[in-house]
Amino acid sequence: MKKLIILLLFIPLVSFGQQTFEDPEFIETTLETPGAVPEFSLLQSEDIERYRIYSTTNNYISLLLDTQTGKLWMVQIAVGDGVAMKTVLSDVSWSYTLKEAKEALKSSLDFWESDTAEDNEAFKPKWEDFKDDIGVIGQYKLYQTKKMYNFIMVDVINGSTWQVQWSIDKDKRLVQVIY
C-alpha cells in the first residue's frame, strides 16, 4: 500500500517536471543575437504581401497591386446579376522578378550573339546589368488622393512615383510616371 501511495505521488512530479530542450545553436542564433528572427516567423509574417488589394470610393471596385513589380489591376466584384472581372490597369513591370531578370538577360544575350556588328566583349550583357533591377516584395505601395479616381503609386525604395487613374471607362484609365 505504501508503495502505491509513493508511486502515485511521484507520477505527477515526473510528468510535470519534464522540459523540452532546444538545440543550443538555435537558441544562440535566434534569441541571443540582436535583431535575429527565427525562420518560422518569416512564414507567418503579415507584412509580406506580394499582392495587395486597395479599396476605392466605389463599393464594387478595388485595385490589385503586385508589390514587387508595380503591375496593377482593377478588380470589380459582382452583386446580383452583375459581372465580376479583373481588368489590367498596367502590365508594365517597373522592377523585375528573379525569373523575369533571368529571361531578360537570356534575351539580351541571344540578341547580342545574333548581332554580327557587335563583336566587342565590352557590350556583352552581364548579370550585373539586370540584378540591381530585381524588385523586392513590398517595394510598391498605393496612396489615395482626394480625387476619387486617382491614387499615387510610390516605389518606397528609390522614391519614384506614378499617377494611377482608374475608371470604368477604358479611355480614362491611366498609369503614368510623375517626374
Image: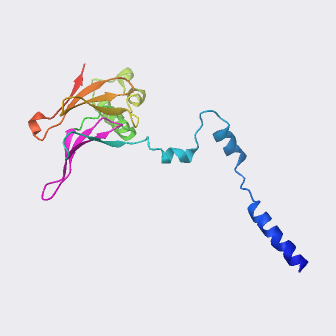
The picture places residue 66, in percent across and down from the top left corner, at: 32, 40
Q: Residue at x 37, y 42 (%)?
A: 50
Farthest bottom residue? 1
Q: Residue at x 87, y 72 (%)?
A: 6
Query: Which quadrant holds residue 5?
Result: bottom right
Tell me: 111 left or right of 49.
left
Tell me: 42 left or right of 36.
left
Query: Which quadrant holds residue 174?
Result: top left
Q: Quick one: 84 or 118, which is closer to the camera? A: 84
Q: Residue at x 39, y 42 (%)?
A: 49
The picture places residue 28, in percent across and down from the top left corner, at: 69, 40
Q: Quadrant of the N terminus?
A: bottom right
Q: Quick one: 171 or 122, which is closer to the camera? A: 171
Q: Is residue 56 above or below residue 14?
A: above
The picture places residue 151, in percent across and down from the top left corner, at: 24, 31
Q: Quadrant of the C terminus?
A: top left
Q: How many marks?
A: 0
Farthest top residue? 179
Tell me: 40 left or right of 79.
right
Query: Which quadrant holds residue 112?
Result: top left
Q: Is 61 contained in the magenta span?
A: yes
Q: Quick one: 16 or 168, which is closer to the camera? A: 16
Colour scheme in use: rainbow
Q: Which residues are magenta?
A: 60-89
Q: Is residue 151 above or below residue 3?
A: above
Q: Is 132 contained in the magenta span?
A: no
The picture places residue 137, in percent across and down from the top left corner, at: 40, 37
Tell me: 76 left or right of 126.
left
